[in-house]
Amino acid sequence: MDERDRVDRAVRDFIWNMVEIHSQLEEIHKSWAQLLGITQPQWLILMAVDELDEGRGVSGIAVANKLRIHPAFVTNQTKKLETMELLARAPSPDDARFVQMSLTPNARAEVAKLTDKRHALNATMFDGLDQASLDYLNKRLASIAKNSQLASQKLRIGVL
């Protein structure tokens, strides 16, 4: 087996590992969602809002971009989450045509109840990796994500 074949094999192994990780993460997100009585996509929206909100709320477009889903789906689901009193939606102070969203105190309390379980889950998933290893891994994965986005664009326009 030559070098090119070994690299190709390593890339295929990496891709299949990512497929497996993605599958397991979906199951984990479904479990978290069930604990709150919501759907897995709603859980991800809540987590994206929590991640992106810096005290002024976050736009539906920002959430859609983070999750790589259609903004209309975010709007539909966030209205449901608002009805369930897990998400607050308010007109943007900069432009009333847009909505800023944030977790309600109720949602924060529900997510906080899961903190110990989330820490235990993370400890299991990342057993054997220290902070420096995770930082290194995240930098490499960010690079791969950026490069795969470029590769996808090239494939779409027929350059590859």
Image: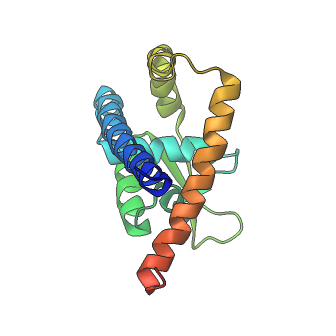
Q: Is residue 42 positioned above or below 8 on the image?
A: above
Q: Is residue 22 positioned above or below 37 on the image?
A: below
Q: Position of residue 52 (x, y in %)?
A: 62, 48
Task: Work out whether residue 154 or residue 69 is closer to the camera in this orientation and state it.
Answer: 154
**Residue lying furthest front in this view?**
1
Task: Work out whether residue 10 or residue 144 is closer to the camera in this orientation and state it.
Answer: 10
Q: Position of residue 35 (x, y in %)?
A: 31, 26
The image quarter in which residue 105 lies:
top right
Residue 62 makes an appearance in the image: no
Residue at the image point whose x is 38% and y is 37% from the top: 21
**Residue lying furthest bottom in this view?**
158
Residue at the image point whose x is 45% and y is 85% from the top: 157
Task: Work out whether residue 31 or residue 59 is closer to the camera in this orientation and state it.
Answer: 31
Tell me: 81 left or right of 127.
left
Tell me: 73 left or right of 128.
left
Q: Position of residue 129 (x, y in %)?
A: 58, 21
